[in-house]
Every structure is written in C-alpha cells, then in structure tokens.
C-alpha cells in the first residue's frame, strides 16, 4: 500500500500508471480504487479474445486473491432476479461489485434445474434425470457441475462423477451440457451445426483459477467448446446458459445478451472487492 507522503505517493502512482499502460482492464480499475484510497486489491482480469473468427469476453479469477460467490436470493428470501438487483443488494450492504454473471440453467418455476450450493448449503439437489433425446440444453449429455470447494479450489466435473464422489463444495452450480470433457470437445456436438446463439461457460484451468467466457456474437456449441479447450486450455468446461447470458464488470459494463432477450436470473456468480460487513 502506498504511503501518502507527497514523494512516496507520486512514486507509487507513477509505478501503477506504468503497469496500467502495459496491461488493460483490471489495472485501470485498480488504479481508480487506489486513487480513492481503497485497500481492496483484486487479481480479476478482464480481456477480449479473438479465436477462429469469433470474439469472446473473458473474466479470469485467481482464487488466491478473489473470492467467488454464488447468489440467488436476498436477505429476505426474495430472488435477486437480475444483475441490477444484485447491484442494488451490494449497494445496500456497502459492497463493491467487481463481477457478476448468470449461473446455470433453471426451470419454469424459476428454481435452479440442478444442484445449487451457496456457502456450503445445498439449496437444490443434484439432478440425475436423463430425458430422452435432447429436450433442452440441460439434458444434453453429459451435463455437469462447476464448483469451488471448502479449501478454495475450483473444478468442473460431469454429473456422473459428482454423483460418484462429490467434493465438499462451498459453492456449486449444475448446468449442461459439458463443453469439454477430459480434454475433448463434447462428442455430441455437430461441428457443422448452424444453431448459433450467445453462449456463456466456465472452466477451471487450474485449481486456483477460474475462467468465465461469453461470446459477443452467436456461436455454435462446437465452436464454443473448441474455444474453451484450445484458447483457454480447459480440460473440462461447462456451458452455463445461452441467449439470456450476460456478464458485468466495472470496466466493460454489460456484455452478452441484448436487453430484449433478458429473463430473470435464478443464480448469479459474483465477486466483490471487499469482505462482508
């Protein structure tokens, strides 16, 4: 932290500016926070990546510095329902929001369609039902679970793997289909498919890191899975949702689905700059 003597402060400020000039996104935000005297430091990084003719927005977390949470409802048990609802909740609790994104797929009653764990509490159990054919994205096999365990380590596993040996999760969200399974793009995806939509997904390139990705234009499942594997090095990756997906950061604002496509969210991944009061 910079000591606020004139000379020390100037040296620190100029050093941060030099770093900011060489990197984008998170360092600009960190500089703004530093100018306001905040003690919060984040390793969260926001960047765009072009891959095979498509553009994706990435939000990458270092779990050694950034705590990832999952939120569905407010303190009174009412659904937060949107990123704007989450931001209002954060403001009322004097929390500084750094990142928000939709979690996994939900049902018609606006409940998580599969496993949903917050702060170690299971709100919805693992969904192991296999519907015939491909009745919705969730039923495409294999589907899976993204989680952060009680030791702060992240991972993605298939539903069958979770059912066989569930980790002690602090947060978890089940969705489907898996985009990448053990280093291979999901075999059920058609490389020639013309079904293109905004798509979001998540993986853990290492136990200490998490990468959230969203396409900025419609893409097929196969192209999205290939991006997660080839550009991000994901050995296992999970699809979160499609046309209604959005990410929010202070650097970018909203990225993803246009407003007319939005529906209420059931769960949201969130990173705050500061601890709970």
Image (cartoon, rainbow, N blue to C red):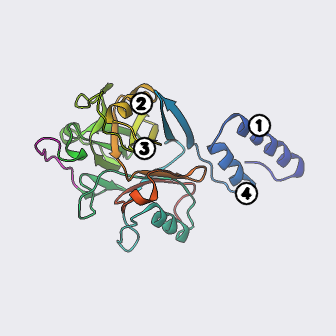
Pointer 4 residue: 37
Q: Is residue 78 left or right of residue 1?
A: left
Pointer 1 residue: 18
| Residue 206 in view in this figure | no
Judging depth in this view, the residue of 5 and 267 nearest the camera is: 267
Q: CA distance from mark 4 to mark 2?
A: 39 Å
Q: CA distance from mark 4 to mark 3?
A: 28 Å
Mark 4 element type: loop
Q: Is residue 257 left or right of residue 109?
A: right
Q: CA distance from mark 2 to mark 1?
A: 32 Å
Mark 2 element type: helix
Image coordinates for residue 113, horizontal then vertical, percent: 24, 54
Judging depth in this view, the residue of 187 and 193 nearest the camera is: 193
Which of labels 4 and 1 is toward the front? 1
Is residue 81 one of those drawn in magenta?
Answer: no
Pointer 2 residue: 227
Pointer 3 residue: 152
Please, is residue 79 above or below residue 235 in the view? below
Which segment did they paint magenta?
125-134
Which of labels 4 and 3 is toward the front? 4
Which of labels 2 and 1 is toward the front? 2
């Amino acid at each position: 932290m910079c000591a606020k003597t004139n000379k020390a402060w100037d040296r620190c400020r100029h050093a941060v500016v030099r770093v900011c000039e060489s990197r984008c996104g998170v360092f600009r935000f960190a500089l703004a926070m530093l100018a306001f005297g905040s003690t919060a430091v984040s390793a969260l990084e926001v960047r765009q990546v072009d891959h095979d003719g498509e553009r994706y927005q990435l939000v990458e977390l270092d779990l050694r510095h950034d705590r990832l949470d999952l939120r569905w409802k407010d303190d009174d048990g009412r659904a937060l329902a949107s990123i704007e609802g989450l931001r209002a909740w954060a403001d009322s609790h004097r929390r500084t929001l750094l990142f928000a994104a939709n979690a996994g797929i939900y049902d018609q009653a606006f409940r998580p369609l599969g496993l949903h764990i917050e702060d170690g509490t299971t709100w919805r159990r693992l969904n192991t039902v296999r519907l015939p054919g491909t009745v919705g994205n969730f039923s495409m096999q294999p589907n899976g679970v993204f989680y952060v365990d009680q030791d702060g380590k992240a991972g993605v596993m298939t539903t069958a793997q979770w059912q066989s040996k569930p980790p002690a999760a602090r947060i978890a969200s089940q969705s489907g289909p898996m985009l990448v399974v053990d280093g291979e793009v999901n075999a059920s995806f058609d490389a020639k498919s013309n079904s293109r939509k905004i798509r979001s997904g998540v993986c853990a390139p290492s136990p200490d890191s998490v990468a959230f990705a969203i396409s900025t234009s419609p893409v097929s499942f196969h192209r999205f899975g290939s991006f997660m594997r080839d550009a991000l090095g994901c050995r296992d990756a999970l699809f979160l949702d499609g046309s209604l997906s959005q990410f929010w950061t202070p650097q970018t604002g909203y990225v993803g689905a246009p407003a007319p496509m939005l529906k209420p969210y059931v769960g949201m991944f969130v990173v705050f700059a500061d601890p709970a009061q």
